[in-house]
């Protein structure tokens, strides 16, 4: 069989962006093109019988079907503008409804289908900027930039109301409210929305609001104590929220809440399941998809990360919870019509469309029996390739908790032979490794490496207590990772302990640097988009001023010692491991200065280090970067480990 190569990036079909109405499913299929150095996407439709292409592309996405099922609206990107287009649900030529110079973050179709609400950034200082007419940035607030978006100061995401016939649009909001999510009320000329009032002083707090579309008057419904993420309307009196209560700051889990619009009562429905109500699994061959909330006859359907799996759950309005679609896989998104359709992947099968039909009546609240069917085979090509399968093992930590761990054997594995091995560390730290497809891991095994990975303390998908390492970075999590390596060495005799490497990105990059400043057991390391100095991170990262304060504790003026103590830069003189550093010049999550400082320090002390900078890329280089840059990144990683471990 063939072996996975870097060039296989072009072969992946990234399936996502799904919407369902009765027997019809629309979804997006995206692909990378190395020659064009770009991504292209088209919309496909499944009508209950067959799959066919719905739009011509080249950059169509996010289809939504009108409430009556007559038409479809989708986003289409051109070089200069972002278009909202409409097409008959039965297929045919689409037409432009309206155009936005700024990006289209999301949109919702009104209950009568006559208008569409569009979420897009607006400039709060249009007249002042027009007068200046310069390239000078006059900044008056934080955050001033955001990873992947660039400069955001003086801008807020607002809702525009667009007439689907004429294309006329009006901005229905004013001021500094930053809208994150919204829905039309079913029986009133109102929109219910979630927004931040003060992203500078209260960056983790968002609230629920209602705007009357007749007079644009806004009323606030919540009391500024939580982080609200998204909503689903039940009726004119009740809605469902996905939200964090922030009892453990950033380490808190997202939960599902029932909210009474008239009384303001908030009730956590997922009290019995302390798991993050979103998909947190790592994957480098997926496209962004909605994490939906769907209400059906007394049940709220939602995604949650349960350890190394992302599943569909449902919770009743009294708190009863059931897993609807599970398995060792990552469910990316779903929708419900006459059947439940979902997009999923696992460690050897990339994203595809699936459906399930229930053999119970809608009113039967007993656990349903599900018949599942795979609908698409966009990634059938991968069946011709030799893929390494995950081998699971558990590791007991020093505090008695078992953590999920895996090893992947090299492709062409021979019994009795020793293999160089790489420890991979995920970012976050509140993300998760598990049963999703990782091209990078498959590539490493195809060239002869074994791969070890795990979910140490701090990972998402488990309890809030497990995720909470605030003030303790580089302590229990470091011991967990070293324990995973020790157990793997005892359990798997093919691992060559003399030829081990370590790599990770973001938090994983921080941990890579932390590890090599404390042990010489790894012969080579690759650190990516890492934090090296929590003090500079506080003032340069798009979220540093609130993330550092929450995760390290207080701010640098009060707790400078802890910020420096937890910084790998402090320990640069201890590093002996050959290190490749990878960073993007427009990474505003972990700004370029993080790597420049560490690289300079290591060179200053005469260490073996190289720095690879990727121009015009951001924090998501490994997942959303330009195809040629993604390929070059993988080439650098493979060659670095080949040079030092083979």
Image: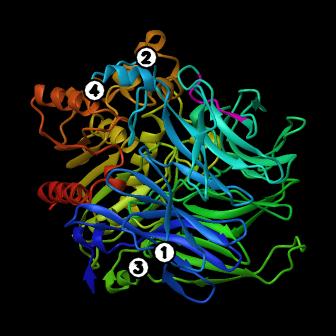
Q: Nearer the viewer, mark 3 or mark 2?
A: 2
Percent across and percent down for residue 400 are: 59, 46
- The residue singled out by tag 4 in the image is 569
Q: Earlier in the sequence, mark 4 or mark 2?
A: 2
In three-dimensional space, the C-alpha distance between marks 2 and 1, rounded to whole angstroms, equals 46 Å
Q: Main secondary structure of the magenta part?
A: loop
Which mark is drawn over residue 140?
2
In three-dimensional space, the C-alpha distance between marks 1 and 4, rounded to whole angstroms, equals 57 Å
Percent across and percent down for residue 447 are: 21, 70
Residue 205: in magenta span: yes
Residue 341: in magenta span: no
Question: How packed is label 4: few (under 14 Cα within 10 Å), some, or many (20 or more)?
Answer: many
- Tell me which residue sits at (86%, 74%) in the image: 362
Image: 537 above or below 444: above
Q: Earlier in the sequence, mark 1 or mark 4?
A: 1
Return the residue nearer the eye: 524 or 544. Answer: 544
- Range of magenta residues: 202-208
- The residue singled out by tag 3 in the image is 379
Give the quarter of the figure containing the N terminus: bottom left
Image: 91 above or below 152: below
Dot 1: element = loop
Query: Answer yes or no: do the residues labelled 1 and 3 have beta carbons within 8 Å?
Result: no
Q: Nearer the viewer, mark 4 or mark 2?
A: 2
Q: Earlier in the sequence, mark 2 or mark 1?
A: 1
Res 31 seen here: yes
- Tell me which residue sits at (74%, 58%) in the image: 111
């Amino acid at each position: 069989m063939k072996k996975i190569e870097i060039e296989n990036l072009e072969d992946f079909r990234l399936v996502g962006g799904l919407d369902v109405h009765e027997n019809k499913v629309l979804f997006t299929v995206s692909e990378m093109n190395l020659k064009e150095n770009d991504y292209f996407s088209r919309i496909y439709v499944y009508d209950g019988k067959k799959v066919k292409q719905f739009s011509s592309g080249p950059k169509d996405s996010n289809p939504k079907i009108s409430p009556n099922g007559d038409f479809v609206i989708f986003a289409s990107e051109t070089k200069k503008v972002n278009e909202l287009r409409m097409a008959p649900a039965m297929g045919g030529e689409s037409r432009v409804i309206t155009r936005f110079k700024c990006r289209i973050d999301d949109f919702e179709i009104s209950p009568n289908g006559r208008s569409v609400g569009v979420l897009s950034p607006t400039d709060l200082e249009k007249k002042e900027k027009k007068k200046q007419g310069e390239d000078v940035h006059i900044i008056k607030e934080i955050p001033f930039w955001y990873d992947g978006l660039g400069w955001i100061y003086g801008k807020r995401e607002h809702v525009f109301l667009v007439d689907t016939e004429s294309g006329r649009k009006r901005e229905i909001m004013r001021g500094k409210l930053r809208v994150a999510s919204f829905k039309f009320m079913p029986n009133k000329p109102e929109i219910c929305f979630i927004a931040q009032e003060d992203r500078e002083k209260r960056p983790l707090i968002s609230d629920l609001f209602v705007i009357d579309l007749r007079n644009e008057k806004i009323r606030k419904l919540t009391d500024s104590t939580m982080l609200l993420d998204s909503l689903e309307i039940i009726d004119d009196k009740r809605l469902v929220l996905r939200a964090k209560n922030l009892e453990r700051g950033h380490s808190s889990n997202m939960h599902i809440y029932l909210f009474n619009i008239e009384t303001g009562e908030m009730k956590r429905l997922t009290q019995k399941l302390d798991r993050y109500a979103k998909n947190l699994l790592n994957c480098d061959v997926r496209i962004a998809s909605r994490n939906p909330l769907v209400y059906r006859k007394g049940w709220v359907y939602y995604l949650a990360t349960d350890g190394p799996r992302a599943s569909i759950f449902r919770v009743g309005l009294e708190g009863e919870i059931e897993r609807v679609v599970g398995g060792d896989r990552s469910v990316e998104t779903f929708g419900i019509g006459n059947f439940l359709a979902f997009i999923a992947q696992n460690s050897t099968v990339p994203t595809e469309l699936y459906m399930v039909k229930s053999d119970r009546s809608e009113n039967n609240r007993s656990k349903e029996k599900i018949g599942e069917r795979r609908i698409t085979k966009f990634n059938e090509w991968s069946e011709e390739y030799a893929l390494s399968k995950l081998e699971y093992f558990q590791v007991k930590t020093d505090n008695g908790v078992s953590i999920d761990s895996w090893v992947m054997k090299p492709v062409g594995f021979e019994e009795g032979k020793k293999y160089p091995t790489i420890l991979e560390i995920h970012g976050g730290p509140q993300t998760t490794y598990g049963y999703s497809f990782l091209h990078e891991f498959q590539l490493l095994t195809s060239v002869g490496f074994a791969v070890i990975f795990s979910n140490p303390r701090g990972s998402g998908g488990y309890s809030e207590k497990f995720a909470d390492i605030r003030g303790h970075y580089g302590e229990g999590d470091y011991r967990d990772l070293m324990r995973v390596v020790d157990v793997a060495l005892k359990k798997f005799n093919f691992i060559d302990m003399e030829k081990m490497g370590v790599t990770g990105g973001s938090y994983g990059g921080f941990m890579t640097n932390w590890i090599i400043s404390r042990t010489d057991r790894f012969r080579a390391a690759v650190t990516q988009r890492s934090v090296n100095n929590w003090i500079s991170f506080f003032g340069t990262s798009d979220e540093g001023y609130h993330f550092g304060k929450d995760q390290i504790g207080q701010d640098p003026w009060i707790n400078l010692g802890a910020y420096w103590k937890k910084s790998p830069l402090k320990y640069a003189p201890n590093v002996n491991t050959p290190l490749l550093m990878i960073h993007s010049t427009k990474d505003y999550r972990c700004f370029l200065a993080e790597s420049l400082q560490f690289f300079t320090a290591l060179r200053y002390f005469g260490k073996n280090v190289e720095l690879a900078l990727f121009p015009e890329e951001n924090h998501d280089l490994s997942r959303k970067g330009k195809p040629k840059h993604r390929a070059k990144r993988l080439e650098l990683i493979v060659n670095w480990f080949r040079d030092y471990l083979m």
